[in-house]
Image (cartoon, helix red, strand yellow):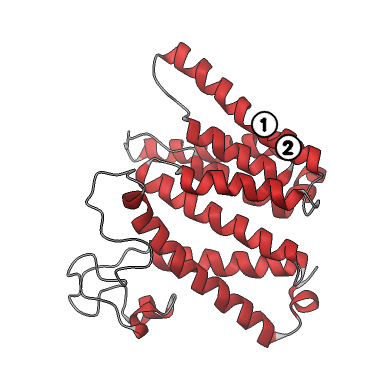
Amino acid sequence: MGFKTVLGGPLLSATVLLAGLTAGSFLNLVIHRGPVMWKLVDAPARGDLIRPRSYCPKCRTPLRFPNLLPIASYVLQKGRCAACGASISARYPVVEAMAGVSTLLSVSAFGLSLAALAATVFALALIALAFIDAETGFLPDAITLPLLSAGLAANAVSLFARPLDALIGAVAGFFAFWAIGVAYRRLRRRDGLGLGDAKLLAAIGAWTGWVYLPLVIFTAAVMTLMVAVARRKTKKTDEIPFGPGLCAAGFAALFFGERLVSAL
């Protein structure tokens, strides 16, 4: 389906995009504050996702409404805090843009429907998980487990896969990565894949069904290997999280799975 056919014109398209950008702004809060709230990182807790209001991490000046406009505020302020001039991470507009495009893609693929809403939730959760894992090395249960439950609930009415396929996908996804992790630990005497990766693959399997799991694992492995090669050339030796690759592959499987499989 094309954007014009499904979205019904520029006004609706703009509304959907704005909703996605706004959701992306909230995702940045989740990515920034969530790991502290869930005690994934060693830092003092400072409220929750709602309070206190957003502020500059450098000078702690509360942000006014114009400073919170997705992407636009970053561009107008040239990537710097309006109060102290400190540099603002490019992650903020990138996450907002990804959320906006994902929301448009969901409505384009599934129309104004329950499936589009569910696909948007799936995509937004994957964006948050990818950035949290990239920045902290953790995949929080606070997101992966509800995402798993949501996938099973969505496919209880066969939104994206048959109920049995979704259940098998969840179970197979978890135990596939659990087995790989155990084998790696015995061979290398250290952890390679954590249970967070297994729970994430289980969640993806619950959404896409078991049939796309090989595609997800292969795509994620290739993407992670490419990042590893690129980082080795820059002489960076820190561990590379597998979660971002899984998130990208899971997103591709839900939205483009049939095309990708038919192309192989």
Residue visible at 76% across and 65% down? 110
Rendered-image quadrant of the N terminus: bottom right
Q: Distance between the residues labelled 1 and 2?
A: 6 Å
Query: Which is nearer the eye, 227 or 59?
Result: 59
Tell me the element at label 1: helix
Q: Label 2 sits on what residue type? A: Leu
Q: In this view, does 17 lie above or below 141?
A: below
Query: Which is nearer the eye, 42 or 142?
Result: 142
Task: For label 2, count other residues whose C-alpha is less than 10 Å away and answer few (under 14), some (14-19) or many (20+).
Answer: many
Q: Quadrant of residue 198?
A: top right
In the rendered structure, the answer to whether residue 130 lies left or right of residue 154 reads left
Return the x and y of residue 60 as percentages of the image width and height: 20, 70
Return the x and y of residue 165 as percentages of the image width and height: 78, 38
As drawn, the label of residue 167 is: 2
Whether residues under marks 1 and 2 lie with C-beta atoms below 8 angstroms apart, the answer is: yes
Q: Name the residue under label 1.
A: 171
Residue visible at 77% across and 37% down? 211
Return the x and y of residue 9 as percentages of the image width and height: 73, 85
In the rendered structure, the answer to whether residue 80 lies left or right of residue 251 reads left
Query: Which is nearer the eye, 233 or 195?
Result: 195
